[in-house]
């Protein structure tokens, strides 16, 4: 049996994912959690074979969880399962160490196949994610997005600022100092040629990094 951990902050989604996984016949859910911190703790405790992680979670987000798991448990394949279909998220997830990327509208058709494939050592990208990466390659450097200039941490801070989180809350989520958060904010304003948090929020909404 393939042991699976599910991390998603919506209980209904977790219940649906558990049903899909356990109806496969060759998998079992050994842990389901609602936030990033719990995901890290349960991976250490339960030693799953595959982790299915949502990007948008309270506290530590899915990209950060994936990065930390890749460092601490390099042999554990992570699948990002998310509502986000933007190119930036696919790229950042792969950079963080994810072996799979599928969207929630792909479930249940692709989730079971994705788990089996990454467990066997291969990468699995949904058709939407593959199309986005192909578009990026075809576009080359001619139409780069302003987001391309941001580091993954800067992108994470941008999302949190746009959602109204304080510097203290962001610092706590990522284990960094408040001063460091302010440095990231300054860099974001400079790189994106924006003036304040309101403009950062507008930019994030326009680029579909957060919901309006």
Image (cartoon, helix red, strand yellow):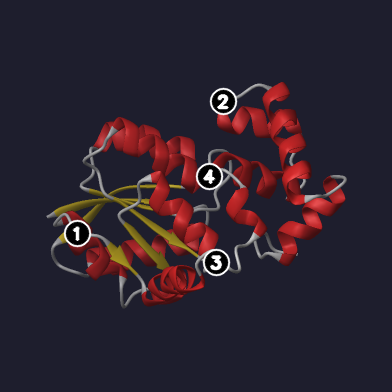
Mark closer to the chain start, 2 or 1: 1
Mark closer to the chain start, 3 or 1: 3
* Residue sitting at x 61%, y 68%: 143
Dividing the picture into quadrants, the one containing residue 174 is top right
Instruction: Give the CA distance from mark 2 to mark 1.
Output: 32 Å
Measuring from the top left, give residue 58's x and y in whole percent. 58, 44
**Front position among marks 3 and 4:** 3
* Residue sitting at x 31%, y 68%: 111
User: In the drawing, what numbered circle is on residue 86?
Assistant: 3
Dividing the picture into quadrants, the one containing residue 126 is bottom left
* Residue sitting at x 30%, y 73%: 110
Dot 3 surroundings within 10 Å: few (below 14), some, or many (20 or more)? some
**Front position among marks 3 and 2:** 3
Callout 4 secondary element: loop
Mark closer to the chain start, 3 or 4: 4
Mark closer to the chain start, 3 or 2: 3
Q: Is residue 199 placed above or below 153 in the rendered structure?
A: below
Measuring from the top left, give residue 25's x and y in whole percent. 14, 67
Callout 1 secondary element: loop
**Front position among marks 4 and 1:** 1
Instruction: Give the CA distance from mark 2 to mark 4.
Output: 12 Å
In the displayed structure, does residue 25 sit left or right of residue 71? left
Instruction: Give the CA distance from mark 4 to mark 1.
Output: 24 Å
Callout 3 secondary element: loop
- Disc 4 designates what residue? 61
């Amino acid at each position: 049996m393939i042991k699976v951990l599910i991390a998603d902050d919506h209980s209904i989604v977790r219940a649906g994912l558990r049903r899909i996984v356990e109806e496969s016949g060759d998998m079992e859910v050994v842990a389901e959690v609602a936030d990033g911190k719990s995901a890290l703790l349960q991976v250490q405790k339960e030693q799953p074979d595959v982790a299915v992680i949502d990007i948008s979670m309270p506290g530590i987000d899915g990209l950060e969880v994936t990065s930390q798991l890749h460092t601490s448990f390099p042999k554990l394949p992570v699948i990002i399962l998310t509502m986000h279909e933007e190119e930036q998220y696919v790229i950042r997830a792969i950079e963080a160490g994810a072996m799979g990327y599928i969207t929630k509208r792909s479930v249940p058709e692709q989730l079971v196949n994705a788990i089996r494939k990454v467990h066997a050592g291969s990468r699995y990208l949904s058709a939407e994610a593959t199309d986005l990466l192909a578009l990026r390659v075809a576009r080359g450097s001619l139409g780069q997005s302003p987001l391309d200039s941001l580091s993954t941490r800067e992108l994470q801070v941008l999302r949190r600022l746009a959602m109204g989180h304080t510097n203290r809350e962001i610092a706590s989520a990522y284990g960094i100092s408040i001063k460091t958060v302010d440095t990231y904010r300054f860099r974001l304003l400079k790189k994106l040629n924006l003036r304040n948090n309101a403009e950062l929020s507008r930019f994030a909404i326009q680029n579909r990094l957060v919901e309006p």
